[in-house]
Image (cartoon, rainbow, N blue to C red):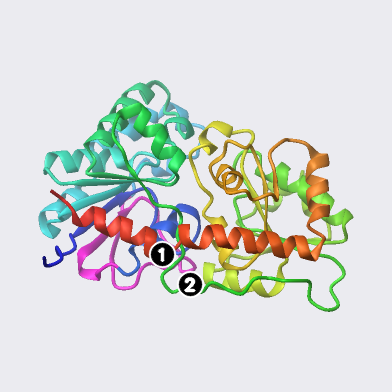
Amino acid sequence: MPQQPLPKILYISDVPVELSSAGATLLYRLLEHYPKDKLVIMQGVGVSKDQPRIPGVQYHVIKSPLERLRYTRFAKFLKGLFLAAEVIGSSKTKKMIRSYKPDIILTVSIRLMWVHAFRLAKKHKLPLYLILHDDWLTSENHGRWQGYLVSTFASMYKYASERFCISPTMEKYYHSLYGVHGKVIYPLRGKDDKVLPLVTGRKPGMEGLKFCYAGSLFTGDFAPMLDIVAKYIGELKGELHVFSYWNKELLSKYPNLNAEHVTFHPFMHATDLMRKMNEEMDVAILLNSFLYELPFRYNFSSKLVDYISAGLPVFFWGPASSGSILWALEHGYQAVVTLQDHNLVESMLGNLQLTEKRFAYAKKIRELGIPEFSYEQNHETFINAISDRH
């Protein structure tokens, strides 16, 4: 039987499709090699020169006139207007439906552009494909409009031709709520990303270990948690290298993150970052939030994929219920602290000073992660689903 041709995708979402970080990187890697004439991207966030777009693909940035008020003190009074803007939708997206004639609409359930994507799909009787990075129900609150949006989200989830959840925990959770199954697409490596050799030991002449952190600094309690980790790394005569967006003023209250053994690096593309981690670092740090334990049950850290590809052992700290940590625990990985106990953090960081321990952890997590986060497996799940539109 001849293979069904790939559909023309119209992507409508607040999440940018960029080689940058978190959900944006996942989307970039998923769509990077899709036929350029069969993909149009309409996103709610612009792209800087440091965050490259997929070459040859048509991009449009859709910004409401209200956008400049979103982060002001007036925002809490304007939630209804933000929602109304998405219900009404952009004239640009409506014109694109007529001129481009997409076969499917693809969206991500973050902020509110998914409302417009859902309405367009229903109006034009187009299949809707839904990507879920975080649990919208617990990570966002739109005040008096939340009830309406929760109902709309439920309708969209059931209407969608397929739902791509970031973790098995999330898929099970939504199935229990809405009675329909989804598919799991983990954060994935890029098609051309190399899996680098395992990091086996410290480089000659190095006095202490080099730890690296490439996650968010300003999500929940991540900054104070990393400050604690930095304290013990300093006591062990090690270094902490942070590859993340940071703000000097916001970090001023964390003394250990301002210590001499902590270095903040500018933005690096994932491929360059993985190479630097492989060549210069000894241990990667992954944090999940105690403050936001509920939403973290269902998400999955995209940085875990890069850490594993870089050949590093990973030190996890966060609740046992959170997606990435639950994954590690269920697979028998042991470099994990699941309590807010600073003594346990100190002990695990001390344990990681042993070369044979680090190598064993790096080998174990690579064996677990390479097949599950492969480009081939996750991309095939996506392509097979959108190609089957009956």
Q: Quadrant of the N terminus?
A: bottom left
Q: Report crowding for label 1: few under 14, some 14 to 19, many 20 or more residues within 10 A (C-alpha).
A: many
Give the vertical position of 212 relative to 202 (above or below): above
Q: Is residue 72 magenta?
A: no
- In this view, 376 is above or below 97: below
Residue 151: x percent and y percent?
Answer: 30, 25
Residue 268: mark: none
The residue at the far bottom in this view is 204
For label 1, the SS is helix
Which of the two residues, 9 or 370, is positioned nearer the viewer here? 370
Residue type at mark 1 is Tyr
- Identify the image quadrant of residue 276: bottom right
Q: Position of residue 240 (x, y in %)?
A: 75, 60
Total marks in image: 2
- Tell me, yes or no, whether the two marked residues, 1 and 2, touch with CB atoms within 8 Å: yes
Can residue 89 be seen by looking at this rendering?
A: no
Decide which of 278, 94 is in the foreground and name it: 278
Of marks 1 and 2, the one in the foreground: 1
Report helix, strand or loop for mark 2.
loop
- Is 41 part of what is drawn in magenta? yes
Q: Read off the residue under disc 2.
A: 193
Task: Give the residue displayed 73% in from the left and 35% down from the top.
Answer: 340
Q: CA gap, disc 1 to disc 2?
A: 9 Å
Q: Position of residue 209 (x, y in %)?
A: 80, 64
Q: Which class describes the residues within 10 Å of circle 2: few (<14), some (14-19), or many (20+)?
A: some
Where residue 348 appears, as percent x and y from the top left, is 78, 49
**Mark 1 vs mark 2: which is more N-terminal?**
2
Q: Which amino acid is tagged 2? A: Asp
- Where is mark 1, residue-wise? 375
- In the image, the segment drawn in magenta is 34-62
